[in-house]
Amino acid sequence: AQSVTQPDIHITVSEGASLELRCNYSYGATPYLFWYVQSPGQGLQLLLKYFSGDTLVQGIKGFEAEFKRSQSSFNLRKPSVHWSDAAEYFCAVGTNRDDKIIFGKGTRLHILP
Amino acid sequence: SAVISQKPSRDICQRGTSLTIQCQVDSQVTMMFWYRQQPGQSLTLIATANQGSEATYESGFVIDKFPISRPNLTFSTLTVSNMSPEDSSIYLCSLEAGNEQFFGPGTRLTVL
């Protein structure tokens, strides 16, 4: 069965600084990988996804993520964060065997002014 | 894309009672999923609901506690039975379409 680990529960960065949120997955074959964002009191929004092809994936709101098979990772990056990026970020993994996806425990991003 | 609606959007219930959450989608889908998000936690998959067959439950979840119906390809219900305060969560239905997972707005349940 697939699983995903987000090692950082909280991350704090200053506005304008760069950001990297870590995600490691466990699955025997090529996974489907997702990053979602959840703002306080809001629903889930898909930032980006990886199924195959180019390992560097561009998403919405200036986010990108890179799939590294050798490291079983799919880290999320943004070159310059904005105060509105403060939210909970979830990495998720799915497979081509079924359509369900499994979520990591999430990383809460705090932005310092 | 897919549009998913859930009813109720929120409810406050007494312990020992049951609540049925409805999920309606705007397109026909084979599989629908029910997730739970406990306060301050991530999403946990409860079960996969296929139309015309019994739901498949994840480890730690049982049909007696979370019975699911899937009468057609656009609708599903999740019942939270014999509720306790530990069941206070947001319950979300979800579906996969075009290699993307779509989520409903969630039902916020508080059990007193």
Image: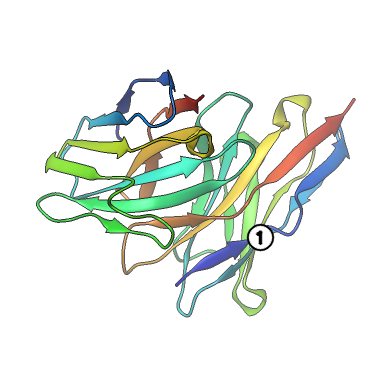
**Viewer-proximal residue among A85 and B43:** B43
Q: Is residue B1 left or right of residue A12?
A: left
From what the image shows, is residue A98 above or below residue B61? below
Residue visible at 59% across and 55% down in the picture = A104
Residue B14: tell me if it is visible.
Answer: yes
Residue with the most extreme front position: B16
Q: Where residue A93 appears, x then y in whole percent?
A: 49, 60
Residue receiving disc 1 = A23
- Give the quadrant of residue A56: bottom right
**Of B88 and B28, which appears nearest the observer?**
B88
- What amino acid does circle 1 point to? Cys
On the rendered structure, is A67 left or right of A81? left
Where's residue B15, x and y in %? 44, 29
Q: Quadrant of the C terminus of chain A?
A: top right
Q: Is residue A51 above or below residue B27?
A: below
- Residue A17 visible? The answer is no
Residue B76 is left or right of residue A106, and the answer is left
* Front one among A12 and B110: B110
Left or right of B34? Residue A51 is right
